[in-house]
Image (spheres, rainbow, N blue to C red):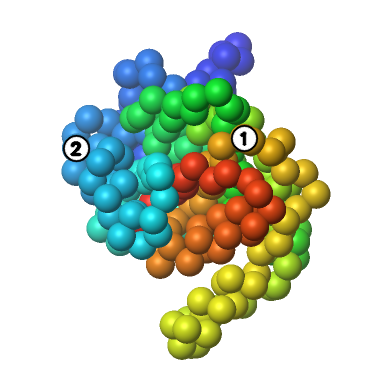
Amino acid sequence: MFRGVELILPRHCIQCGLWLTSQEPWRLGCAACEGRWPDLRGPEGELLMRERCMMHRMWTGFRLRENAALEGQIHALKYKGRRRLGQNWGRWVASSSEAPEVEGSMAALVPVPLHWKRHWKRGYNQAEWIAKGVSQEWGMAVYPNALKRHTHGRSLTSLSRRRRHDLTEAAYILGPKCPPHGTQIVLVDDVMTTGATIRACAAVLESANHQVLGALTLALA
Ligand SMILES: [Zn+2]
């Protein structure tokens, strides 16, 4: 009957459930709800990210812990199997800005990887699904196997800042399928907290002579 309807999901506001009349495929909330979201797309978010991690270009979607509906989205994306939310949110973040200009070279998206055990248990990497959405908007290829996480991500919250930093540094290695050399890489993750993960991933790629242009995250904790 209405087979095409599935292709244009979601069509209801993720916060109040109101039917969305807007045709933009990346639209996730009604005007009233989106107007109240702690939206960080644009220069403000970029500035806040740079305080944690200095990179040429940075993009983020919203500030976490200020809106229960948005927190619920991150939770559903990570723990409830709602991988397609990642794609929708990736489009939402990327739709607010033009694709970064890279003169004379290609650009690619590299999602921050999960440890294979966690990936296997969850069935997907949420950062990869965010990258897929960004890719739809910006037309950049996604390299989900450019990096590998080789230590299991046990909770590091009880450790000292220094020790946590060391462990994050050591957690990532180069994976089997990197973008060609000379490609400008944008790292993609779900939430940026201290910026240590993004810095560690960038360091691995740069030590193998890859160029990291910047990073995009769905939210800023
Ligand atoms: Zn709404």
Q: Residue at x 56, y 63 (%)?
A: 200
Please state the horizontal and vertical placement of residue 5, each as a whole percent of the image. 53, 18
How many labels, in total? 2
Crowd band around label 2 with a 10 angstrom C-alpha radius: few (<14), some (14–19), many (20+):
few
Query: In the image, what residue type sits under mark 2?
Result: Gly
Residue 3 position by quadrant: top right
Mark 2 — residue? 35
> Label 1's element?
loop
User: Which of the labelled discs sits on residue 69, or is there none?
Assistant: none
Please state the horizontal and vertical placement of residue 117, each as a whole percent of the image. 75, 65
Q: Residue at x 54, y 46 (%)?
A: 212
Q: Residue at x 48, y 66 (%)?
A: 196
In the image, 43 versus 183, the foreground residue is 183
Residue lying at the far right of the rendered structure: 176
Query: In the image, what residue type sits under mark 1?
Result: Thr
Q: Is residue 64 left or right of residue 137?
A: left
Residue 97 position by quadrant: top left
Q: Is residue 55 above or below residue 137?
A: below
Q: Is residue 177 above or below residue 49?
A: above
In the image, 86 versus 115, the foreground residue is 115
Crowd band around label 1 with a 10 angstrom C-alpha radius: few (<14), some (14–19), many (20+):
some
Mark 1 — residue? 183
